Image: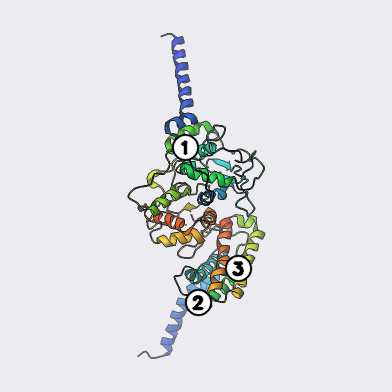
Amino acid sequence: MSKRLVLSGLVAALLCGVAGFWLLTAPSVWHAVRGSVPVATGPARLENGQTLFWAGGCASCHATPDQDDRLRLGGGRALPTPFGTFRVPNLSSDTRDGIGAWSELTFIAAMREGVSPDGRHYYPAFPYTSYALMNDQDLVDLLAFLKTLPPVSGRIADHDLPFPFSFRRGLGLWKWLNLGGVSYQPQTGQSDLWNRGAYLVNGPGHCAECHSPRDVMGGIRTPLRLSGGPDPEGGAGYIPNLTSHPSGLAKWTAEDVAEFLKTGFTPDFDSAGGSMASVIKNMGHLEDADRMAIATYLKSLPPLPSNKPAKKTP
Amino acid sequence: MLKITMKNTALMLLAGTVLALPLLSSSVSAQNDPIASRKAVMKSVGGAMRDPGQMMRGQAPFDLAKVKASLETFVEASGKMSALYPKGSETGGETTASPKIWEAKADFDARLVKFGADAKEALGSITDEASFKANFPKVGQNCGSCHETYRIEKK
């Protein structure tokens, strides 16, 4: 074999590799394989959109920092994580800097497929792996509600991530591993309350995003879902186990869970801190029935031991 | 029957002293150990939240005297708290105090003042079950709103 033949073989292999990577990581290819065409939806129901806004915790990340109005969604909060610092974008109704000009299809692509209006992958710090479970009508309702909120001008700077995490295109591979693409399908053997809870917890509520351990790629370890995990926002703490294991919610009644989501007080009258206190501020806006649905679903989870590292003895 | 003799008395005194020693030493260390002290004060607040909390949830009958006792505890605790976060007590003792406390001590202190003021106001405004249900949640909300910024998850 001539040297020239070997060289051209290598070049061909390299080109195939590059082309393969390009195809594999293309948002459009993911969409063609796993995506769905949104089904025709009815007119937007603002009240339902508002419920989903609070269930989805949008304000916890997107509200302008250092002010008290949780409906002012200018973004700008910095999220320090093990992968780098993410900067939360503007979610207000501003047509230039926010989402005021977004169509329903654009919004559904963002929430279900993690794709931006200009066709790029979003980082999963935006928890679209959970939001993907939301149904089309709910997404349409949520967008309509978001558009009723005040516009805030100001585009937020891009994330501050080191290589290789700065390479957005690579997220295409991550999505094949971690993004399902099918909205929540109610389980027939379960009550409406349980199904509503499963939807709220795993879909809009995105509880598993913090309350689960993750693998080295940053994907949720599915068999250990909701059994607690290290703080994904980079804190030193451990996010609690939500299954009915003694290290989790075994001693809590469903009423205790619902009450906690409303007031932030545990059955021992300790009061939630950190990000969970912010979550309570959202959950407090839900109807009692929705909090009870969440509680019913969580209390039905099979017990899984927490992976919390043993405390170091001094 | 036990005769009260010199020997018995001495023994009892000795036993009493031995029993009291850990109590004494813990209270002494609490004074020198702001982390242990503020944990104790926080625990007193959590403990005082139980009675009114159960009344709010309908798990216990309304009892004005107990509500007032709890509110008094909140007022007292809110006054003690600020001094228990001196510089140098940022870490150790499994503290769940956020480093943000020392970055924004004035805001932290202002929240403690507000907590005390809200509890004091509730002492005046709560006179029966209806006014309790209407006014108590406002006091309790201070816990979460302060913890959101200034408390971190346990390791």
**Spatial CA span between label 2 and label 3:** 23 Å
Q: Say which chain tag 1 marks.
A: A
Q: Nearer the viewer, residue B52 or A287?
A: A287
Image position, residue A176 (x, y; %): 43, 34
Residue underneath mark 2: B63
Q: Are marks 2 and 3 on the same chain?
A: yes
Marks 1, 3: nearer the viewer: 1
Image position, residue A249 (x, y; %): 40, 58
**Spatial CA span between label 1 and label 3:** 54 Å
Image position, residue A95 (x, y; %): 64, 39
User: Hey, what amino acid is under mark 3?
Assistant: Ser
User: Hey, what amino acid is under mark 1?
Assistant: Pro
| Figure quadrant of residue B116 | bottom right
Q: Say which chain tag 3 marks.
A: B
Q: Say which chain tag 2 marks.
A: B
Q: Residue at x 66, y 42 (%)?
A: A154
Q: Secondary structure at mark 3?
A: helix
Q: Nearer the viewer, residue A129 or A171?
A: A129
Residue underneath mark 3: B78
Q: How is the image coloured?
A: rainbow
Labelled disc at residue A38: 1
Q: Residue at x 62, y 72 (%)?
A: B120
Do tag 1 and tag 2 residues touch (Cβ < 8 Å)? no
Q: Nearer the viewer, residue B113 or B37?
A: B113
Sort mark 3 into few (<14), some (14-19) or many (20+) by Cα contacts within 10 Å. many
Labelled disc at residue A8: none
Residue with the most extreme front position: A43
User: Hey, what amino acid is under mark 2?
Assistant: Asp
Q: Are marks 1 and 2 on the same chain?
A: no
